[in-house]
């Protein structure tokens, strides 16, 4: 479960392979599972992860700046996105 600890950072799993093809990103995780990110928002947040470690609040800020969405709704969406990526071994969480 995603917590609200502001010290937690998220990074791409070190064994993740990924490739952008057109507007989508295809992923192969360490367990050899194949995943696809196809929504514009998911791809945008994934691109942030490619640049380096990110905190939950950075993702929330990205969504509230780009879309007409409340911080609360953005936080819910970010939490679901991060939880999904953690469960699929796409990202890891790092605590300070």
Image (cartoon, helix red, strand yellow):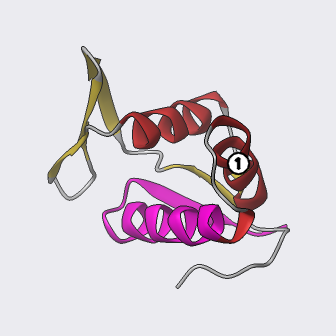
Q: Residues within 10 Å of mark 1 (few under 14, many from 20)?
A: some
Task: Using residue 40 as the reference point, say whether residue 7 is left or right of it.
Answer: right
Q: Residue 71's quadrant in the figure?
A: bottom right
Locate residue 89, reporting x and y percent. 36, 61
Q: Is residue 78 magenta?
A: yes
Main secondary structure along the magenta-highlighted residues: helix
Locate residue 17, reporting x and y percent. 31, 34
Element type at mark 1: helix
Q: Say which residue appears at 35% left-offset and 71% top-offset.
A: 87
Question: Is 77 situated above or below 4?
Answer: above
Q: Identify the image quadrant of the C terminus.
A: bottom right
Question: Is 12 situated above or below 76?
Answer: above
The region drawn magenta spans 73-96
Q: Residue furthest top?
A: 22
Task: Using residue 58 as the reference point, say whether residue 2 is left or right of it.
Answer: left
Residue of label 1: 64
Locate residue 18, reporting x and y percent. 31, 31
Q: Say which residue appears at 26% left-offset and 27% top-offset.
A: 24
Q: Is residue 84 magenta?
A: yes
Question: Is 38 situated above or below 78?
Answer: above
């Amino acid at each position: 479960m995603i917590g609200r600890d502001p010290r937690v950072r998220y990074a791409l799993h070190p064994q993740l392979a990924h490739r952008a093809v057109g507007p989508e990103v295809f992923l192969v995780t360490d367990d050899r599972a194949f995943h696809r990110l196809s929504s514009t928002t998911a791809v945008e947040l994934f691109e942030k992860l490619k640049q380096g470690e990110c905190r939950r609040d950075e993702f929330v800020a990205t969504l509230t700046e780009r879309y007409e969405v409340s911080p609360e709704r953005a936080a819910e969406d970010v939490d679901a996105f991060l939880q999904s990526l953690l469960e699929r071994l796409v990202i890891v969480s790092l605590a300070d």
